[in-house]
Image (cartoon, helix red, strand yellow):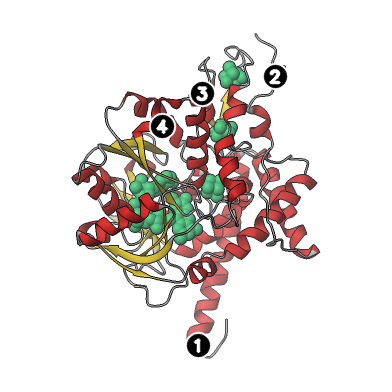
Amino acid sequence: MVINNNIDISTVVSNYLCHSCGACQVICPANAINYNVTSMGLFLPQIDYSLCTNCSLCYRVCAGVNLSKGITAKLNAMDDPFVGNVLQALVGRANDSFIFNNAQSGGLVTIVLAYLMETGKIDGAVVVRADEDNIPYVKPFIAKTKQDLIQAQKSKYVPVNLMSIFSEIEAFEGDIALVGLPCHVHALMNLTERKKSIAPKIKYLLGLICGGVMTYKATELLFEKSRVPRNEIKNIIFRDKLNNNYLDAKVSVVSIDARKHTIPREVRFELKKYFTPPRCKFCFDKLNIFSDITFGDPWGIEGIDNARGDSLILVRNDKGSELIEHLIDADKISMRKINLADALTGQNIRGKRLDYIGFRNAYRKTNLGETNYKVVFNNKIQKINDEKSSEYVSYVKRFIYLNRLPHEKVKKLIKRKLIYSDSLRKVKFIIKKMLPWSKL
Ligand SMILES: Cc1cc2nc3c(=O)[nH]c(=O)nc-3n(C[C@H](O)[C@H](O)[C@H](O)COP(=O)(O)OP(=O)(O)OC[C@H]3O[C@@H](n4cnc5c(N)ncnc54)[C@H](O)[C@@H]3O)c2cc1C
Ligand code: SF4
Ligand code: SF4
Ligand code: SF4
């Protein structure tokens, strides 16, 4: 057994700074890293010290705490790291009705990828889908056809170790586009600075906006709530725009006979309060600032389709701009320009800044350390009051407390909370029916 004297990712994990990107596992020369799920459902790397050689590479590449030189330089050059460079803000949708209806939002991610494939600009795309042999886990794969892309549609609001696809990209013959969350993009950039082989293959970075994930234990609670036996569950659609509507989409648990079992959206919201990892709260890059194009929901924008959805995009560079122009010219998408300021309000970037400062302080107060990079606010520093500040600390402490309990106990506690909020919702609903003027 080798004594571990050097720094490795165990400190990142124990300090709740890991976001499960998978970069450490890729870089480890000793194959000493595997994944483990905690009581609260965090999906975390774990080192087998009988194999580890103390090389520290995993820590150095870890996007949970480090940003590469290249990213840091870009970050420092930005006026506002919470927004990044934006050439255009647009709202619109895919004109392909199948892709649109099957999408999370307006289907823009998928139509862009399908167009890139059709026109030979890429040969494959890194996307994700449910791991059917290991539900509820989600895994990345390289899509090579439009059908593959369709299979990957819709948001999976769970952590995905996207970098586990790295060796497949290395072996892939051809050009690639990668769809990822902001932390995936950070991880990719960290890795490609050290493992340069795949950099020339990745032609496009399509970034999703990210307000955070819920852990896999939250998905398991949604499964239980659906009452579908575990061995009959095929998939979950966290926000199913075809179940109710886009704005108030419900959760659908899909069984192997293709039936949808509905769970009220409020249950998902309630679970989010407990199962969002603190690392997501302490994350500055909601808008995926290093991507070529950022994709999200057009929250707060006037005139969007609340029934079936639209997409928001932020075009970040000339490559992204040219691509969107080509898709418009080819009649693949319908887009209109919007004000960036409206998009930022809709995405609550002000709230993100406050959360970032609040959770950074909460991490300090709970001795969890912090990232090795600094996000410079320039003149956009905001202050948080004491009451709010203690809310942030309580969130972190509660998560840690629950994560140390046995899972069965966590489940019991959260189920009790769900029953309470369910009853409250029903009472509110009845009162509203009886007293339509009630403000409840
Ligand atoms: C965890 C998460 C949090 C998000 N938070 C916000 C938010 O706060 N505000 C907002 O406006 N938008 C958010 N989004 C983005 C939004 O949900 C849609 O993904 C986006 O609008 C694209 O929709 P679409 O119809 O163009 O994509 P679709 O055509 O439905 O395609 C979706 C694509 O996303 C990929 N994908 C799905 N889940 C993941 C995942 N976990 N990791 C990596 N790739 C994935 C799929 O492989 C697929 O290629 C979030 C997405 C995720 C996954
Ligand atoms: S220190 Fe080196 S050998 Fe050990 S887990 Fe990290 S990368 Fe692998
Ligand atoms: S590299 Fe990614 S998965 Fe590994 S410890 Fe860091 S954040 Fe977690
Ligand atoms: S909030 Fe940040 S850390 Fe969490 S999943 Fe999204 S990009 Fe990753």
Q: Is any atom of residue 51 visible in this view?
A: yes
Q: Is residue 139 above or below residue 116?
A: above
- Mark 3: few, some, or many residues within 10 Å (few <14, many ≥20)? many
Query: Which residue is rendered at x = 41% and y = 29% of the image?
Result: 166
- Residue identified by numbered label 2: 6
Disc 4 residue type (three-letter): Ala
Q: Residues under labels 3 and 2: Cα distance?
A: 16 Å
Q: Position of residue 207 (x, y in %)?
A: 43, 49
Of the two numbered discs 3 and 2 on the same chain, state the one appearing first in sequence: 2
Q: Tell which quarter ligand 3 is in.
A: top right
Query: Label 3's element?
Result: helix
Q: Residues under labels 1 and 4: Cα distance?
A: 62 Å
Query: Label 1's element?
Result: helix
- Residue identified by numbered label 3: 27
Q: Residues under labels 3 and 4: Cα distance?
A: 15 Å
Disc 3 residue type (three-letter): Ile
Query: Which residue is rendered at x = 50% and y = 89% of the image?
Result: 436
Q: Residues under labels 3 and 1: Cα distance?
A: 61 Å
Of the two numbered discs 1 and 2 on the same chain, state the one appearing first in sequence: 2
Disc 1 residue type (three-letter): Met
